[in-house]
Image: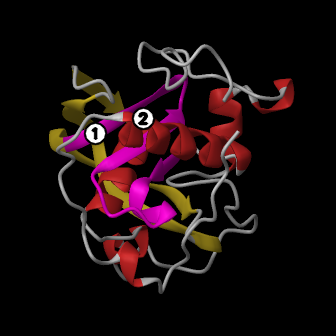
């Protein structure tokens, strides 16, 4: 297990944007595992490489029954209907705000082996995918707030991950069972024979 410190709001690496990944090598695979382990350790639903101090276009997610990672993602809204929902971030601890997002999105990218990946997400998964893609562009969810959505924190601050609130634990339904592995073809451990 390789849990790394999470960079907090105010750290310049969260604002600098991220470079495209060029080498799909052992360093990238180690980063994906670190993202996964750190995200799971903190109970997060998503974690982007800049949050670990790595300004490259990679994130991991485990949200709404879906799990995996994306390298060099590009995001396109599929539904212009907005949804406003509670959102928090591991890099902005103890803050939970109502944030507007697209309801359904398509994200295309690659996995750590350089194979193409396409993810369509709606509702909570769409929120997570947008939140993590924002991190790669140097944005945090607070940048998305407007006067109508940036009210006081919710009664229960988000402490468990990017783009999430307490509903996330219910949607994932996996926190009480201990250590969890992703259930998709993008399992970061699939090529490593289990824990490292």
Q: Residue drawn at (38%, 83%), measured in percent from left and top?
A: 12
Snapshot colouring: secondary structure
State left or right for residue 55 relative to residue 118: right
Q: Nearer the viewer, residue 177 or 143?
A: 177
Tell me which corner region of the image, top left, top right, bottom left or bottom right, holds residue 78: top left
Residue 55 located within the stretch drawn in magenta:
yes
The disc, 1 or 2, on the residue closer to the chain's N-terminal end is 2
As helix, strand or loop, the secondary structure at mark 1 comes to: strand
Q: Is residue 89 above or below residue 72?
A: below
Q: Quadrant of the N terminus?
A: top right
- Mark 1 residue crowding within 10 angstroms, few (<14) / some (14–19) / many (20+): many
State left or right for residue 156 relative to residue 191: right
**CA–CA distance between discs 1 and 2?**
11 Å
Image location (x, y in percent) of residue 4:
63, 57
Q: Nearer the viewer, mark 1 or mark 2?
A: 2
Image location (x, y in percent) of residue 95:
62, 73
Q: Residue drawn at (27%, 36%), measured in percent from left and top?
A: 104
As helix, strand or loop, the secondary structure at mark 2 comes to: helix
Image location (x, y in percent) of residue 93:
65, 72
Residue 83 visible, this orientation = no
Q: Residue drawn at (70%, 61%), measured in percent from left and top?
A: 159
**Disc assigned to residue 26:** none
Residue 27 visible, this orientation = yes
The residue range painted magenta reads 46-73
Tell me which secondary structure the magenta stretch mostly adopts: strand
**Residue farthest along the front direction in this orientation:** 26
Image location (x, y in percent) of residue 17:
24, 69
Q: Is residue 140 above or below residue 123?
A: below
Which residue is denoted by mark 1 in the rendering?
Answer: 71
Q: Is residue 170 above or below residue 54?
A: above
Q: Nearer the viewer, residue 106 or 13?
A: 13
**Disc assigned to residue 29:** 2
């Amino acid at each position: 297990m390789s849990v790394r410190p999470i960079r907090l709001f105010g750290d310049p690496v969260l604002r600098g944007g991220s470079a495209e990944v060029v080498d799909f090598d052992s360093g990238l695979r180690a980063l994906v595992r670190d993202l996964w382990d750190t995200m799971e350790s903190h109970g997060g639903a998503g974690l982007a490489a800049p949050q670990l101090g790595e300004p490259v276009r990679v994130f991991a997610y485990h949200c709404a029954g879906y799990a995996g990672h994306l390298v060099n993602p590009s995001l396109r809204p599929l539904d212009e209907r907005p949804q406003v929902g509670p959102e928090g971030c591991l890099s902005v601890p103890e803050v939970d705000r109502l944030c507007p997002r697209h309801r359904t999105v398509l994200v295309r990218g690659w996995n750590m082996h350089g194979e193409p990946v396409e993810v369509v997400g709606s509702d909570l998964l769409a929120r997570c995918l947008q939140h993590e893609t924002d991190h790669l562009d140097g944005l945090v969810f607070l940048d998305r707030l407007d006067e109508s959505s940036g009210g006081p924190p919710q009664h229960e601050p988000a402490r468990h991950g990017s783009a999430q609130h307490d509903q996330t634990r219910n949607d994932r339904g996996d926190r009480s069972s201990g250590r969890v592995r992703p259930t998709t073809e993008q399992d970061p451990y699939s090529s490593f024979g289990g824990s490292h």
